[in-house]
Amino acid sequence: MNNMPKTKAEERRQYIRLDSVFPVEIYLKDHEHLIQAFTRDVSLGGACLSVNDPDPALVALAKGGAGTFDIVLNLPFIRRPIEARVKAAWHEFIDTPRHRQLIVGVSYDKIDERDK
């Protein structure tokens, strides 16, 4: 049995996370093109997404935390993509030699029950 105290982040988590990289399509309202992203982890409650050189409209949504946007998760072990409406819960930026990455934690605002 593990007697190590839990961190605050671990105490807040409701679901186990799957730490895997999967392709994600992000669709913003009134935006003509999709934004390519990748998961850092996925859970029943949401996901952590990584976006290279993010679109300013996505950055605004992540910073504001008030709006929602649509994502399509493409998991190789599921026959069809999973579609969800999500809301940004937190964000951070990582500057790399090649890109500025937006790391954004999202919670599901709307997702089909069979996709949870």
Image (cartoon, rainbow, N blue to C red):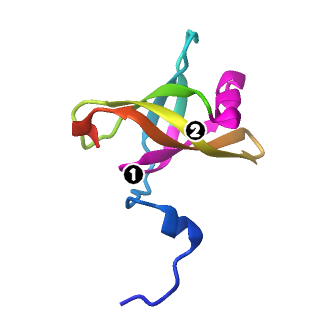
21 or 18: nearer the eye? 18
Magenta segment boundaries in residue numbering: 38-65
Q: What's under tag 1, amino acid-wise? A: Ser
Q: From the viewer's perspective, is 66 left or right of 92? A: left
Residue at the spot of label 1? 43
Residue 12: image location, x then y, percent? 50, 63
Say which of marks 1 and 2 sits in front: 2
Residue 71: image location, x then y, percent? 45, 29
- Report crowding for label 1: few under 14, some 14 to 19, many 20 or more residues within 10 A (C-alpha): some
Q: Is mark 2 on a helix, strand or loop?
A: strand
On residue 75, the disc is: none
On residue 88, the disc is: 2
Q: Residue at x 25, y 30 (%)?
A: 80
Residue 79: quarter of image: top left
- Report crowding for label 2: few under 14, some 14 to 19, many 20 or more residues within 10 A (C-alpha): many
Residue 111: quarter of image: top left
